[in-house]
Amino acid sequence: MSSPSPAAAHHASTPDGLPVPRRYWAIAAILLSICMSVLDSTITNVALPTIACDFHASSAASIWVVNAYQLAILVVLLPLASLGEVLGYRRVSQAGLLVFTLASLACALAPSLVTLSVARLIQGLGAAGIVSVNAALVRFTYPHRHLGRAIGINAFVVATSAALGPTIASAVLAVAQWRWLFGINVPLGLITIAIARYALPDVERIHRPLNHLGALLYAGMFGLLLSGLESLAHHSATSIALAQLAGGALLGAALVHRELGRAAPLIPFDLLKVRLFRLSLAASVCAFIGQMCALVALPFEIQRLGHSAVETGLYMTPWPVALALTAPIAGRLAERYPAGLLGGAGLLVMAAGLALLAYFPSAGTAAGFIWRMAVCGFGFGLFQSPNNHAILSSAPRARSGAAGGMLSTSRLAGQTLGAAGVAILFRAYPATGSNLALSAAAALTLIAALVSMIRLTGPDAAPP
C-alpha cells in the first residue's frame, strides 16, 4: 500500500486527539453523519402507509423500505470496520457519507416501491460506512482524558435522533410529501462532506491484505440469520425460517474456522480475549435486546390498556428524553468511575422500571406511567455511555475500528433480536404478547446488570 500523500500527512491526527478548533469541526461532522444515519432508521416508519398508498402496494411490501436499510447496515458493518483499519477511517466514513447522500436523492426520486427499496438498500450500505467507523473517529478526535464525555455526546445524539425520528417525520409530512424525508439528507449530506473533508482525523493505517472471503461469509451468515428470525414470526414460513437459520449457522461455523487463527480477524477474536471488552459487549447485547423488546411492545401494551394512538405517542416520549438527558452526564462520570458500577446501577434501575411497567394496572394514572418510562430511560442512559467507553478504551488504539464496529454491531444485533423476539411472542400469544415482552425485557435487563457488575471483579487488561 502506498504511503500517505502530503495532504494526508498534513491532516494526520495528533497522538492524543485533534487540536482546537479542528476538533470541534471534526466532531460536528461525525455527529451530523451519525445523526442522519440513525434518523433514517426510524423516520420512514410514520410514512409507510402513505408510501404504500402512493405506489398502490400492500402494507407488508412497504415494510421492505425499513427492512432493506437495517439489513444492509448489519451485513456489512464489521467488514467495513475492518476496511477502515486498512484504508483509513476517514476514507470509509467519507465514502459512506457520499453513498448515503446520493442514495437519499435516489430515494426521493424513486418511481416505484421496488426502486425505493433498492435505493434504501444502497442507503443502508452508505450508513454502514458511517456507523462502522463512528466510534473510532470519536476516539481519535478527542484526547483520551476526555473520551468519556465525547462518547456521552455521541450517545446523546444517537438517542435523540432515534427519539425524534417519528416527530420529525410527522412535521415534514404535515407540510410536504414523503419524498422530502429523504430529500432533506441531500443538502445536509453535502454540507457534512465539506466539513469532513477538512476536519476528520487521518489515522495511520494498518498494512494487511483485504479479507474478501471473510466479508462474504460474514454477510451471508448475518443475512440468513436475520431473515430466518423474521420468518419465524410468520406461521407459513417456519420451514423456510429453520432452513435459513441452519444455513446461517453453517456459514458462521465456516467464518469462525477461517478467522480464529488470523492476526486481525474480521470478528475480533483477539479483542474478545480481553475480559473487559467481552463482558462489556455481552452486557450491551443483553441490554439492547431488553430495550428493543420494551420499545416495540410498549405501543401495543399502551393501547391494550385502552389509550389512543395519540396518547401512545405522548406516553412513549419520557423514555428517550430521559435517556438523552442522562447520556452526556454518564459520559463524564465514566471518566471517574468504573463502567461496571455505573452500568450495573443503571440497568438495575431500568429493570425495576420495566417490571413496574409490566405490572402497571389498567386503572393507573398517566403520571404513574410516565414516571416509570422516565425511570427506564434514565437507567439505560446511565449504562450506555460508560459501557461504550469501556468497549473502546479496553482495545488497543490500532484496533479502534474493530472495537467500534463491534460496539455498533452489538447495538444493532441486540435491537434486531429484540424486535424479532417480540414478533415471535406476538405470534405465540396474540392477546398477552406485549405484556410478556415487557416481563422478558425486565429479565434480560437484569441479566445485563449482572454481567455489567461482574466487571468489578478480577483484573482487566489495560490497552497498550
Image (spheres, rainbow, N blue to C red):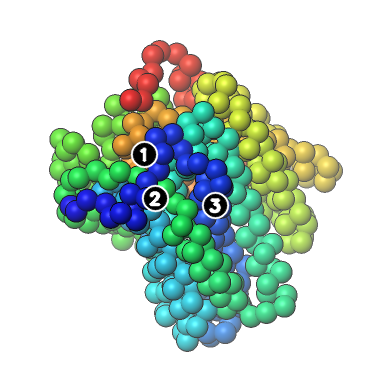
Asked if the residue at tag 1 contacts the one at tag 3, i.e. Cβ–Cβ closer than 8 Å, the answer is no
Query: Mark 2 and mark 3: span between their CA atoms?
Result: 13 Å
Q: Earlier in the sequence, mark 2 or mark 1?
A: 2
Depth order, front residue of 463/111: 463
Q: Residue at x 32, y 37 (%)?
A: 399
Residue count near mark 2 (Cα–Cα under 10 Å), binned few <14, some 14–19, many ≥20? some
Residue under the point 45% across and 78% down: 106
Q: Is residue 366 visible?
A: yes
2 or 3: tag closer to the N-terminus: 2
What is the C-alpha distance between the residues marked 3 and 1? 21 Å
Q: List x then y, in percent, for residue 206.
A: 24, 43
**Is label 1 in a helix, a strand or a loop?**
helix
Residue at image position (63%, 50%) is 160
Expressed as whole percent of the image width and height from the top left, the position of residue 133 reads 40, 49
Residue neighbourhood size for the residue with mark 1, other residues' Cα within 10 Å, grouped as few (<14), some (14–19), many (≥20): many
Q: Which mark is residue 11?
A: 2
Lateral position of residue 211 relative to residue 394, left or right: left
> In the drawing, what numbered circle is on residue 25?
3
What's the amino acid at mark 1?
Ser
Give residue 34's mark: none
Classify 10 Å Cα crowding around label 3: few (below 14), some (14-19), many (20 and above): some
Amino acid marked by disc 3: Trp
| Residue on which disc 1 sits | 400
Whole-percent x, y for residue 337 in the image: 57, 21
